[in-house]
Amino acid sequence: MGAERELAIVFADVVGSTRLYELLGDLRASETVGLCIRLMRQATEEHRGTVIKTMGDEVMATFASADDALTAAAEMQKVMAVQPMLHLPDGQVTLRIGCHYGPVVREHRDVFGAAVATANRMTSQAKPGQIITTAAMVEQLSHLWRSAVRQVDLATPKGATAEVLLYEVLWQEEIDDVTSMVRPLVMTPSPRHAPARLLLRAGGTEFVVDARQTAMTVGRADDNDLVLRGNLVSRLHARIEQARTRFVLIDQSTNGCFVLGEGMPELFVRRDTFVLQGRGLIGLGQSPQAGTAQTLEFVCEE
């Protein structure tokens, strides 16, 4: 029996591989999946990880460091997004990636344990192009990586017995700055025209998100920073956080948020994130109307 140790576990799989075989035929589809596996393996090994096994269109890897695991996962997404051979007539081939940190038993070049199952479940929670991880993983991250991770949901993954917090790694924001992922990428803000603070108003109450107060919550429960009542408002409806030079709306509700900004059409955000710019209105569970109890006014101030 192998010894138990704590590791970061990453599962990455190619989205829609069955469709690839239908679209490209067996030979070319097999070559395409093989290229994806090679890119995932290369990203793993370049960031001090170990590929434990490949299973068809999926790679399972482990890392001693949570930072290395997310760096490798972000690199996988980045190289997939810019690989010309993976651009097909109906779109780019993408990955779903799930990560977790916890105790595993290593035996016969394989790893076992509940943490492995949890990491695999995170993959099923990810959308194409996403990296989803857990609170246990976030707790192991350095400050640099934590600034690129946002809570997006509370769910009971298939096969689990309890709800878990889900976190998304916002790797897309850094794609233009990446050469070796994360070491320079997280700390390369663009100070020009960056908003210094976000002013929020609702029902005569005002709240500021800035360098001193980097996050706030809004919902109908009394423990929120801004309390808005309404039948369509969830207890914890949304979070608004400062993410480097941006202010991000993170919807966590049943009915979603409707965002109306200057010069833009109304957008619906549900269990997703949205970068707030300029000034506008946020409607909790319904279209925003200035002055109503379910509407939040926002202003990004430089």
Image (spheres, rainbow, N blue to C red):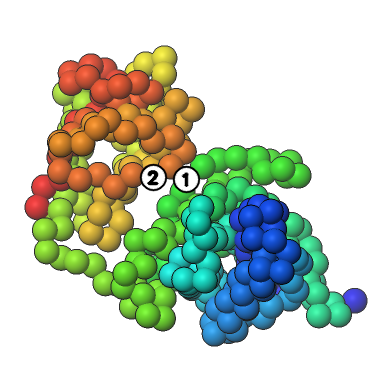
Cβ atoms at labels 1 and 2 below 8 Å apart? yes
User: In percent of the image, x 36 and y 75: which residue is there?
Assistant: 178
Pinpoint residue 35: horizontal percent, then vertical percent.
61, 74
Mark 1 against mark 2, which lies toward the viewer? 2
Height in image: 119 above or below 48?
A: above
Whether residue 123 sits left or right of residue 184 in the image: it is right
Which quarter of the picture shows residue 181? bottom left
The amino acid at mark 1 is Val
Q: Give the vertical position of 49 relative to 270 (above or below).
A: below
Amino acid at circle 2 = Thr
| Disc 1: CA contacts within 10 A as few (<14), some (14-19) or many (>=20) | many
Residue 107 locus on image (x, y percent) = 84, 77
Residue 273 is labelled as: 2
Q: In this view, does 184 lie above or below 278?
A: below
On screen, residue 119 versus residue 184, left or right, reads right
**292 or 75: nearer the eye?**
75
Residue 138 is situated, as x and y percent measured from the top left of the image, at 51, 61
Residue drawn at (51%, 52%) of the image? 90
**Residue 89 location, x and y as percent?**
50, 56
Residue at the disc numbered 1: 152
In the picture, the disc for residue 33 is none
Q: Which of marks 1 and 2 is nearer the N terminus?
A: 1
Between 38 and 45, the one lying in front of the other is 38
